[in-house]
């Protein structure tokens, strides 16, 4: 009898040590926000706060960790109330933000995130992805968070670019460029909300890394 | 959810909007808000060891209704 082998994790051998800090940071952000998965939007929070020319280029264009996190919370975190019609509720005297703040304070983000799951049997970030049947993900500190569908896309982008460049590993620059190229998940709507097109950011990241002369990862 | 709907409609009416567009959107949003809050509160009550009967009485519905709606999820919490 043959057993199907688990596909080896793409993340670890692929990334340089510096770049690896980004998925790990993303995991911590997702956990801190009480979200049931890790997506590229959480990596983006970690990336925007990193000490690297690529991250500095993002911050120059207004993609700061605080602003990204604000959008993540608006789009998915505190997600229990994120999709409510705030304008209509304001018309009858209910301030959704005040309700969210109060509930977060009382029950904690984790309870809100659990309830958000229950309220929406299908996650808002993708029609076919089911967090109850996770594929790849991150296991750390006794917590398992599955990867969102955009993480695979990001890693495949990085892999393709790495092979094209004949680099031995993926560094922060390549990871940033791949992250900014994903079409799934929350990164595109977050960048749209921040008013910075992905193409502009990719050019800025490439320029910044070229200017500082980051050596290729050979 | 009947009680919640009545309350929602009352609030919308109290706001005095005669424009159905505004009023109906408000009612729909209030209903969604109520459902989300209900999930949070039921989970919390189950975690604190409340019985389905106690929860149902407070929500003004039958025990079966609340169990059917939240049983598979909140049952694991209790």
Image (cartoon, rainbow, N blue to C red):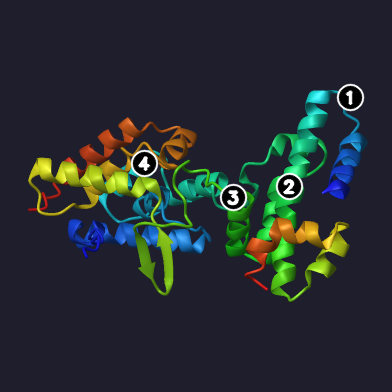
User: Tag 1: Cα neighbours inside 10 Å, few (<14), some, or many (≥20)?
Assistant: few
Q: CA distance from mark 3 to mark 2?
A: 12 Å
Q: CA distance from mark 1 to mark 2?
A: 22 Å
Residue A102 in view here: no
Q: How many marks?
A: 4
Label 3 resides on the chain identified as A
Q: Which mark is residue B18?
A: 1
Do the residues indicated by labels 4 and 3 lie within the same chain of the protein?
yes
Q: In the rendered image, which residue does mark 2 sit on?
A: B33
| Vertical arrangement, residue A129 with respect to residue B69, above or below | above
Residue A178 in view here: yes
Q: Nearer the viewer, residue B23 or B68?
A: B68
Q: In the rendered image, which residue does mark 4 sit on?
A: A60
Please say if the residues under marks 4 and 3 sit with CB atoms less than 8 Å apart: no
Do the residues indicated by labels 4 and 2 lie within the same chain of the protein?
no
Query: What is the secondary structure assignment of the residue under circle 4?
Result: helix
Q: CA distance from mark 4 to mark 3?
A: 28 Å
Q: Nearer the viewer, residue A128 or A175?
A: A128
Q: Nearer the viewer, mark 1 or mark 4?
A: 1
Q: Which mark is residue A79?
A: 3
Label 1 resides on the chain identified as B
Q: Which of the two labelled residues, at mark 4 and mark 3, occupies the earlier sequence position?
A: 4
Q: CA distance from mark 1 to mark 3?
A: 31 Å
Label 4 resides on the chain identified as A
Please say if the residues under marks 1 and 2 sit with CB atoms less than 8 Å apart: no
Across and down, in percent, residue A122 comes to 54, 46
Do the residues indicated by labels 1 and 3 lie within the same chain of the protein?
no
Q: In the rendered view of the protein, which quadrant contains the N terminus of chain A?
A: bottom left
User: Tag 4: Cα neighbours inside 10 Å, few (<14), some, or many (≥20)?
Assistant: few
């Amino acid at each position: 009898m043959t057993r199907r082998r688990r596909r080896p994790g793409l993340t670890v051998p692929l990334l340089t040590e510096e770049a690896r800090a980004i998925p790990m940071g993303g995991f911590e952000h997702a956990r801190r926000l009480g979200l049931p998965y890790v997506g590229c939007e959480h990596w983006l929070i970690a990336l925007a706060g990193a000490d690297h020319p690529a991250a500095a280029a993002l911050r120059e264009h207004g993609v700061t960790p605080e602003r990204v996190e604000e959008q993540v919370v608006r789009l998915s975190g505190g997600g229990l109330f994120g999709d409510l019609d705030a304008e209509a509720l304001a018309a009858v005297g209910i301030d959704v933000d005040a309700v969210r703040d109060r509930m977060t304070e009382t029950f904690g983000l984790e309870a809100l995130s659990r309830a958000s799951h229950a309220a929406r049997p299908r996650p808002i970030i993708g029609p076919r992805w089911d967090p109850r049947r996770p594929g790849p993900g991150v296991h750390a500190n006794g917590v398992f968070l599955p990867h969102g569908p955009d993480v695979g896309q990001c890693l495949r982008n990085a892999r393709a670019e790495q092979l094209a460049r004949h680099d031995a590993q993926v560094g922060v620059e390549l990871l940033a460029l791949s992250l900014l190229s994903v079409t799934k998940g929350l990164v595109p709507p977050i960048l749209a909300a921040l008013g910075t097109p992905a193409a502009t950011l990719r050019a800025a990241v490439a320029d910044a890394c070229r200017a500082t002369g980051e050596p290729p990862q050979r | 959810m009947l009680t919640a709907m009545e309350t929602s409609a009352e609030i919308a009416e109290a706001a005095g909007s005669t424009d159905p567009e505004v009023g109906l959107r408000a009612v729909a949003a209030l209903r969604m808000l109520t459902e989300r809050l209900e999930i949070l509160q039921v989970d919390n009550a189950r975690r604190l060891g409340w019985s389905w009967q106690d929860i149902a009485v407070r929500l003004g519905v039958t025990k079966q209704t609340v169990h059917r709606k939240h049983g598979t999820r909140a049952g694991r919490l209790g």
